[in-house]
Amino acid sequence: MTFMKSQDVISGKLGRVYATIDGNIEEMLYVKNIEATIEKQKTEIPVLGKTGVQHKAGGWNGTGSMTIYYATSIFRKMMLDYIKNGRDIYFDLLIENEDPTASIGKQSVVLKGVNLDSITIAKLDVESEILDEEISFTFHDVDMQEEFKALGR
């Protein structure tokens, strides 16, 4: 009987995020968490003789969010470029999970065509020890450069 070993649970702290913006690669050391989701767009298909509805996939939508320490101006500058010049910037994010204790190796996912939805332009909070900010985004393509090995192998 094969089972998952505790050391193969991936630590959420062990990973890296890189942004490629206008050809420049930035290691995003200020990321606290990041999550990207793909949701299928489905059409309901009523079928004669069935009381239920069937579904057919007809596309997908990529969305994400990240919480970062309030320690970089890069995303504010991108949004200001859009406001002042109408230049909407699309960039790529490389997200790597790699826990050296785990036997399943590393997973690397690239989100392509990332586009910001909203950013915090300025922030103060007298009750906070640490300032952070939420950033939401969309993306229009994705690749998996490396994948985890199967458990138990």
Image (cartoon, rainbow, N blue to C red):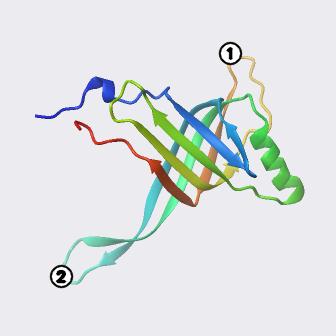
Within 10 Å of the Cα at label 2, are there few (<14), some (14-19), or many (20+) other Cα atoms?
few
Is 106 placed left or right of 53 in the picture? right
Disc 1 target residue: 129
* Depicted 106 relative to depicted 136: above or below: above
- Identified at 49% across, 27% down, the residue is 14
Q: What element carries label 2?
A: loop
Label 1 to label 2: alpha-carbon separation: 62 Å
View extreme (left): residue: 1
- Identified at 18% across, 82% down, the residue is 49
Q: In front: mark 1 or mark 2?
A: 1
Is 12 placed left or right of 140 in the picture? left
Is 38 placed left or right of 103 in the picture? right
Q: Quadrant of the C terminus?
A: top left
Whole-percent x, y for residue 43 in the image: 40, 73
* Depicted 119 relative to depicted 130: above or below: below
Foreground: 43 or 1?
1
- Identified at 79% across, 49% down, the residue is 79
Residue 2 image label:
none
Amino acid type, callout 1: Glu
Residue 49 image label:
2
